[in-house]
Each structure stands twice: as structure tokens, then as C-alpha cells.
Image (cartoon, grey):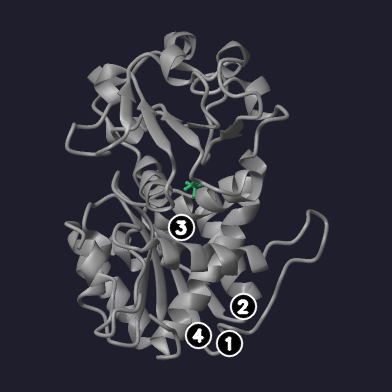
Amino acid sequence: MSSDPSAAVQRDASGRLRHLITLEGLSRAEITTLLDLAQSYVRPAGAFPARDRGLAGHTVANLFFEPSTRTRVSFELAAQRLGAEVVNLDMQSSSRVKGETVLDTIYTLQAMHADILVMRDAEPGLPAAIAQLVAPHVAILNAGEAHLSHPTQGLLDALTVRQHKGDFGALRVLIAGDIAHSRVARSAWQAFRTLGVAEMRIAAPKDLLPGKEEFAGASRYTDIDRAIEGVDVVMALRIQRERMGSARIPDEAGYHRTFGITPERLRQAARDALVMHPGPMNRDVEIASIVADGPQSVIQQQVANGVAVRMAVLTTIARNLRGEGSR
Ligand code: CP
């Protein structure tokens, strides 16, 4: 049983996923089933993308109250390729700027028969709160919640690692950078932990490490040169300036020198280590440009997998809304 209240809120009375708010509480079998379905939507670069009609008759609304490129566009493409109608709310020209609440915006879309609402917001707990208030035929998909949760990012990270490494049981995974403010780190950790990664390491400058009550079981480092030794996966994270007080913002050159993933540091990882980054990157700050574009980088593959994973999540949630999915 998970201690995260969102884990219970996202399930229907039969235990099926009605919403997707967090990876906390998902079983290894549930995550593996989502990854298998996502893999079925992956196509080689240059091929026509996968399409089916699994969302025909559904209406997906994208509500991004924080900026996004990858997540918003990939949810839009995923929904279109599954045959849904898609609405992208432009927050700058929506009635939110006239003072309408998020909930009233959601009720307005619900009244227009939007039934899958994809939301990103800076307020912790908002997706779970909204999920408890929408109509029974409406699902909430969390596309980024404060520093807490970004479940589809965690799934696409796991899919990318699985495509290269297969079994998770022998892997040493390092997540490095601004862990304290990162929803990507939390969701990736939840996915990797559930999938049975052998060793999880988190590394950050002292001020950017989370409290000890989080990331239980992961080894914690403030020295990147020690943290990176021998790992099979290196995931670099952006400094989340938008979530920290100005006093804590490190200077970029100094950060790169003391904590950036450079070619010299990468040589201390396993020879075939994967280099990952969820994007957007600050080149030559948390990761050297030459590493981000180098032969070990799977960053563009992460982006491609984002569409496949969101197709899998949309298909699964739509089936469950229709009462067709299995527990
Ligand atoms: N990784 C990620 O969430 O990127 P965007 O902010 O561009 O959606």
C-alpha cells in the first residue's frame, strides 16, 4: 500500500487506473504492460508514425499552466494518432487571465464533452484534487505537477533504458543535478525502483539534494566524480530556477565545473553507459554539449519514446474509462 494519497485517488472502484497522477503504487506488471504497449507504437526514424483508432470518439484537452514543448506536443500528437479530437487551451488567451479558477476551467471543458484532461501545474496536489471532483466519465492525466510527479516522463525514461539494456536487475542508475526540485527525478526513481534496478544513485550539490525521507534506498552523493563511477545510466537534470529562491541559484560556469556531465566525467561511468536528459537542456551547464550530442546520448530517443508512451497511457486510460481494461 502506498503512502502517497494520489496513488489511491487515481484508481476506480475495481482498482483500474482511471487517472494517471503518479507512478507511486503502480506494480511492476502494470508498468511493464504500459511499456510493452508503448513499444508497440515505436517506429524507426523516418518511418510513418504508428496510428490506430483507440481514442475515436474521445476528446483530449491539454491544459498546461506551466511551459512545455515535449510533453504538450507529444500528448497532442499521441491523441491525434489515436483518432481523438484534441483541444489545446492557450492559457494566455483563456478566461484564466480574467480570474477563472482552474476548477471552473475544467468544468467548462467537461461540459463540452472533453473526457481526458491532460494538465501541468506548479501547485502540488492539484491533479489529485481535481481528479476527485470531475465527472465519473472524465480522466485526469498528470503532465507535470510541481516538483512532485511527471509519470509519463518516468515511463518514457524506463522505456528508453529497457530498449538498450533489457533487464533492469543488473543496472546502476545515476540521476544527477537539481534533484530537490525535480519531478522528473521522482517519477524516474519510482519507475526504476519498481522495475528492480540493482542500484540507484542520486547526486546533487548539498543545497539541491532532497530530504532524507525521500528516495529511500538510493545512495546519495554530493561529489559527482564519485557518484558516476561505474554506472550504466547517467541522467542529467536541469537546474529548476523557477522553483528556487534566488539565494540558492548556482552560477552556471561554476556549476558546470563542479557538477556538469563532461566527457572526462563520463569516462568514469561504464564504457557503454547511456546518457539521458529529460529536456529542456541548459547546454554546458548540467551537461556538456559534446556529451549531449555524443554517441552515448539517447536524449532524442527519449523524445521519440514520449509519443509512444503517451499513446500507451491514453489508450489504457480510455479503455478503463469505457470499462474495458483489466486490473
Ligand atoms: N521533459 C519535459 O517535461 O519537457 P517539457 O517541459 O518540454 O515538456
Q: Are marks 2 and 3 in contact (CB under 8 Å)?
A: no
Numbered tag placed on residue 82 in the rendering: 2
- Find residue 152 and name its label: 3
The amino acid marked with disc number 3 is: Thr
**Count of picture labels:** 4
N-term mark: 2 or 4? 4
Secondary structure beneath label 1: loop
Mark pair 3, 1: CA separation: 21 Å
Q: Is residue 160 above or below residue 321?
A: above
Give the SS element for disc 3: helix
Give the answer, above or below, for where 105 lies relative to 295.
below
> Residue 58 shows which numbered tag?
4
What distance separates the C-alpha of mark 2 from that of mark 4? Answer: 9 Å
Position of 215 with respect to 322 (left or right) is left
| Residue 191 image position (x, y, % from top left) | 41, 51
The residue that appears at 27% across and 39% down in the rendered structure is 215
Q: Are marks 2 and 1 in contact (CB under 8 Å)?
A: yes
Quadrant that contains the N terminus: bottom left
- Tell me the residue that label 1 is attached to: 56
- Viewer-side residue, 275 vs 128: 275
Measured as percent of width and height from the top left, residue 137 is found at 34, 87
